Image (tube, helix red, strand yellow):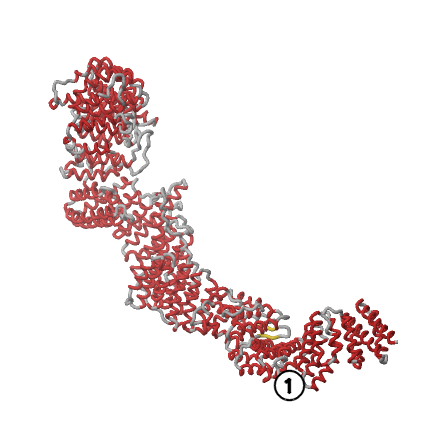
Amino acid sequence: MIATTLDSILNHDNVLTAVDEKTAIEIIAAAVDGLNDKDLVMLGSDLLVTVSRQFCIEVMKQMLNLFQPGNLPSVTTFQTFGRIFSANVNDSIPFLSAVLSMLAPLLPEARTDQLKRAIAGAVAQFADAILEYVARENEAPDQSVKVHFFQNDFGVIYEYILLHWLPKMREPELAAFMVHATSCIARVISKEKLQETADRLLGSAVSVVRKHPHESSASEGLAIVLEMLSSNAKSILEPQLDALLDVIFAQACAPADYAKPFAVKSHNEVLRCFAILYLNFPDRIINFLLAKLSPNVVKSTVIKDASDRSVVGALTIVNKLVNQPDVSFSFYLNALLKSLEPIIAPTPPVTLSNNVKQILAQLVLTLADRLYLTVDNSAPLIEFIVRQCSIPATTIPRSPSGLEVVTDEALRAACENVLHLLTTTVHGMETILLPGLFDYLVMWQYTESARTVAKCLVHLNTQRDVFATLAPSGAVKRSPAVVELFTRLFVLSGSAIDQSDGDSLLRLLQLVVGRMAEALKELWEGTITELENFFTMRASNEGGETAWDGQAWEESLLKLLQTSLHDLKNVEPELIHRIAECFTIQIPLYIDFPEDKAFLYRALGTTLEISTDSLVVNKGLDGIFNSVNHSKIVERQACAVAVGKASSAHFDLILSKLDGFTVPDKQGKRSSIFNLFGSAKESKQESVDSERSKSTIVTCYGYAVSGAPRALLLTRIDDIMRSIMPFFVGVKEFAIKHSLCRFTEMLAKALRETNSTLDKRQALMFHMKDFVKSEPPELRSSVRALAVTACAELAQLPPKITMEEVEDALLLFCNSVFPLLPPRHDSSEGADAANAAYLNYEVLWDATIKALSEFMVTVVKVYRNAEATVVLLRNLKPWLESDSDHERYHSLTMLHNVLTSDAVTENVIAPILGMAMGLLAMRSMDPDARCRETALACGKRLASILSNGKSSDQEWIEAGRQSWMKESLSSHAAATSIAGLFYGILEGDQLVKFVRQLYYQGLLERRAVTAAGVAAILQATLKNKWQPLKEQGPDILGGLLFALKTVRDPATKVGIEGCIKAIAEHDTEMVARVLLNQPVPLLPSTAALWRSLGSVASFAPILLQHCLDTLRTTPCYSEVHIHARCASLPILQSLAVLVELFQSSNNTDLLQANFADLAPVLIVITAAMVGAQSSKPPQFAVSSEQTGADSEWKSVYKVVPSRFAVDALKQLLKNANSVVPISFEMIEDPVMYAEGLHVTCKCIFQSAELDAKKVIAGLVPYLNSEIDAQRAAAVAMYSAMLESKKPTDAGQVQEVVNHLATKNSDQALIVRVFCIRGMGSLAQFGPKIVNANADSILRVILAGLEDSADGNMNSAPIEAMKALNKLLPVIDRARIQEDLISISVRLRPSFESESPMIRSMAFSLFGQAATVAENESVRAAFTQEVHDVLVILLLHLNDDNHEVSTATKSVFKLLLPLLKSEALVTALSYPDGIAYSRLLKLISSALGTDFADKIPAYLNHIIGYFRSESPTMRANAVLLAGNLLAQVAAAGQPDTTTSHMAPAVIHLLSDKEPLVRQRAAEALGLIYQKSSHHV
């Protein structure tokens, strides 16, 4: 880093001179040390070279120390020596002798190629230094120093390198370097040494050059050798000249790679070798080169196509030799020109490569620049240059192998530059170029070079009068006349705008006009500036996106021609005829240039229009007809245009010629312009040409009609139609269809100007529509567009065609045009051909779309009534709603074109206004930005029409600007603003149509983004314009519901819900009414809508109340049959809706506030729905928009009403934050229905703070309902209310009790059961409430105890016993005394119940009753009741059910106080595990002791159980009978009882049950035992 920085500082200006010698020596010492360090070697070398510029002596002293005996310095050291000698020649030369003397002995020590190269390079630099020192002798410090002082030292080194090192070099670059170094050293050796080693040196140099042609060092070295040998050893060089020429010529022919500078330098050095040899051996060199250009060599080279290298190489060398300064080539000029003849104009023609032509053009320029060209010898060369300037524009040249390809455009550009340089820079060339350049202008083969020639002529005219050089007509070699030049240049100017330097043609044309007619000079001078503006505009459009349209340029030229001819008509009429004749004569010049020929036709037609000479006109028309190429569309068209221009003055002459082509000849064939039909031999090509010629004829008719005088046309129209109509028969060729369409269009336009009718209009319309029908689905031609345009023109002729015909044509045209695919640009690489096709297709596409648009505008303009706009919109509507972006966009564009027509007024658009605005609103939300913008433009136009142009455009403009933003599609604000633009101009029925269009079709758009946007527009409309739409509310809502269930896009669904909410804001009741009348189960979309509406705080209460009113007022069943009950549809609908409303968000507070109203109603409805069947769907007419409604309503058949009700109740409890019971499934189970209803009601009251008063009042209407389930639910609610102790007010409790008491005798058992349960629940309220209602309570309970309406189920008695069990502890005992016996009597049937629970409950209640018997009479009566049921109690002590056994034993303990038997107390005091037989024995013993008189009654009661169905009861009975009989026997009582009991006991010994037989045997044993003991 330090060394680099120091070197940079020393290299700075004047720094080195300021360094003192001491410092310099230190720097030098450090740098020399750096040469020995591999990391600093290059930095040390650079630093030494830098310091040597000021302190060379000090540097050389230090450097010489590096030469040690027997040891060669490093490679860098030698390189540094060489660089020092090159950097400071004057100060380093004094050390040259020392360096060479020390170096020479060390040469054999060099072993590596790098070291050899370094030594040779350094010595070569020493040689260059001494030569430079001597050359600048006047500036040298020591002028006595000469080269020969060092020749010996240099000679030794040179000879050693030449003999020992150079032959051994194998690497190309190293070998070339050694040749160059050796040649440099050879310049400072003695002449004798050079002559001695010349052969060896030249041979080595040639050998290296041959082997390594691209090494510039070798070529440069060879050139140095040749220079030395030419001066010092020419005799040695001459014998080897031929071999040497072969070698270096081969090198000269090798193409130079201009991307590589060394390759170019090598090529130039080879050319210098030729220049050196030419100075010494000119004859041999020229002969050698001319031999390479001989005709045979050139021909063989081209035929073999080996390459054009030799020709190119020879011409390149010749060009180098000719261009040498101070060396004349005049002696060899003629030989050279003669040798060039087979190349310039070979006979026969030989195709040469562009490379040869390009170098030849350069040679011509060199010859001219060296003033070797004269008038006599230059003509072929100039013509050669002009010929190359005429090469057609193509990029596919002949590509010779090995040479860089020169394209045709490159060659043409090169030759144009050569010709321009010859004209502008070479002195005296005007005498050589003139008047020949004028001849080239009118030669057809040089048409392409015209602009370049014209440019040269314009320049030459600034130096002299070029027209004065033109040879007169009588001269031996005639020059073109000025008129000929005018017509030629005028035609070529037609395409000048498309060419660079095309303005030169225009400037030359101006000069020619001034020479041709003085009268036109002023006109052209004034107009030429305007024409030059076209070139300015074209230059500014260069590289632009839009292609330049040259039609305006051509029209301007033709207009100028027409004006010029009009001016000449009064001054020189004959000149007009001459111009027409020249145009006609020059037609063959453009046989290969159809565009120019077409322009000539148009110019000739313009001239014939003004010409009055019928002979000239006839000749001109024949020239056009006989030369037109029918296969070229541009020529056919131009021919027709020319005919049209001429027809204004020569209509009858033109018709006669055209009729001659269409009249059948004798063979039944038609004549043709080219007599294509006259040939006896028909071929496919002739058939094609025949069709195309027909096309030309028809097109000519069309333009003739268009340009004809109108009055004359009306007299000839019938003849024209007779000639034309046969062409319509069986036409298939595109060209004829094209021409027929154009003819029809132009004929209709011409007749429209005269307001005349056309008898054949119907037939022409038919043919035009038939052409459209026959077009393929793809866009391949312009026939479709032309036919539609022709129909538009025919429709404007009087009288008006019928509207049916218009609609038929519109339908046909729309179906044919809109499905066409739009053009698509291919941006991929290599898509040039595709893009060219794209441009052509785009033109066809635009023309077709424009034609249909104009047809629609024409229809409106012709009819100017509402019917026309209705028909138009009806045909556009399917395409406005198309799935294809381009179809929607172009249909919108056409609608916009129609609306912008001045024929569209408010009255015209009135019938379609609403629907049109609806369609436009839909498209304003289109995903395609073009569609959005165009739709808004259409809306803006409609608004302007309605306001008579007074509407504000700013809002529409802003909406159009936003329409290009993608965000506007998802912006609700943007859609709302756009909605305001549309509905703001609509009123009444049109607003209704607008809205209907939106909800019937806009919401159903397949493009989700459009549908969502339409929803936003519709929402804004409904919100702001509801009043005029109110009457249509149900229909609108129905359409919205249909859309909601149809669409799938979430955003659109949200938008539709927003629309319904907007309606609900105005008329919530109507929304609720319509929404309730929807199929059940609810569709997902409808359910989501209800949830959405329910989440709105302002809607939810109204909707909830509406559903409640429906549930309260609507009968539960629509039909009631013996075996079925059909649920009412409104009930089901309300339940389904409530389910969704309950699930709406943020409704918890609302549900809790209305819970007291909702819960009772839903409980009642739920009870009524259990077991009910689904209802029938309603009968109504299904609209076309609701084709799926019938299937949706059929789903009602599958509905389970109870499920709907249960779901509603469940959702209410869940969303009101109440406890959701698990009893809902029980409600739907017929067996568990009552219990499920009770649990649910109880849960409702236990989990919510209810307004008891509301609940009580809400249930009253259902107490007298005809439906049992409703009454049961109402009573169940009352029961649950009491059980939950919810009525805290005594009055409310009393009210509930009163309601329950009224239902005590209800016909429905379940009602009575819930009534009893409710009475039992009064126990929770305490004695006061119970005793206050004791009469009602006991009445209900006593009735329940004997209620057997459900048979063996005993649900009422069970409930009564439960209730009584709860009430006995709290009821006043004095009040119950008189009813105890009644209760006891009513309990007896329950003792024998099959249900263990009933038995257990009855026994327990019986025991409880015994405890409250306080009155003596009651106790006595109840004691007797105890004796009456004692046997039952004893038998059930061993009941099959353990709970019954336990309850019975407990009852016995409660009865003991009444029986007052200590023996029984003792008997029943045994532990629970005592055996039943043992227990019976103890009890029987006690009974025998205390109640012996009751035993016969007991036995009479027991005998009845011998027939019990229960084996246990039979076994218990016989065992009890045995124990009691044993007591009788032990007491010595009469055996009357035993006498009739014993057989019964004995009979049980044969019972089928072993247990019974066992107990019977035990009983007999006891009887016998007691009897025996007593005896």
Mark 1 residue element: helix
Residue sitting nearer the eye, 765 or 1024: 1024
The image quarter in which residue 890 lies: bottom left
Residue 1262, percent from left and from top: 56, 79
Amino acid at dot 1:
Ala
Residue sitting nearer the eye, 735 or 1215: 1215
- Quadrant where the C terminus is found in the figure: bottom right
Is 1221 positioned to the left or the right of 327 in the image? right
Residue 738, percent from left and from top: 36, 50
Residue sticking out furthest to the left: 138
Residue sitting nearer the eye, 122 or 374: 122
- Quadrant where the N terminus is found in the figure: top left
Q: Which residue is mark 1?
A: 1374
Residue 1184 visible (yes or no): no
Residue 1140 visible (yes or no): yes
Q: Give neighbour class at mark 1: few <14, some 14-19, many 20+ (Cα, 10 Å).
A: few
Residue 162, percent from left and from top: 27, 17
Residue sitting nearer the eye, 52 or 1195: 52
Q: How many marks?
A: 1
The image quarter in which residue 509 lies: top left
Determine whether 820 is above or below 88 in the image. Answer: below
Determine whether 1020 is above or below 1262 in the image. Answer: above
Residue sticking out furthest to the right: 1575
Residue 1373, percent from left and from top: 64, 84
Is 1534 positioned to the left or the right of 1510 in the image? right
The image quarter in which residue 227 lies: top left
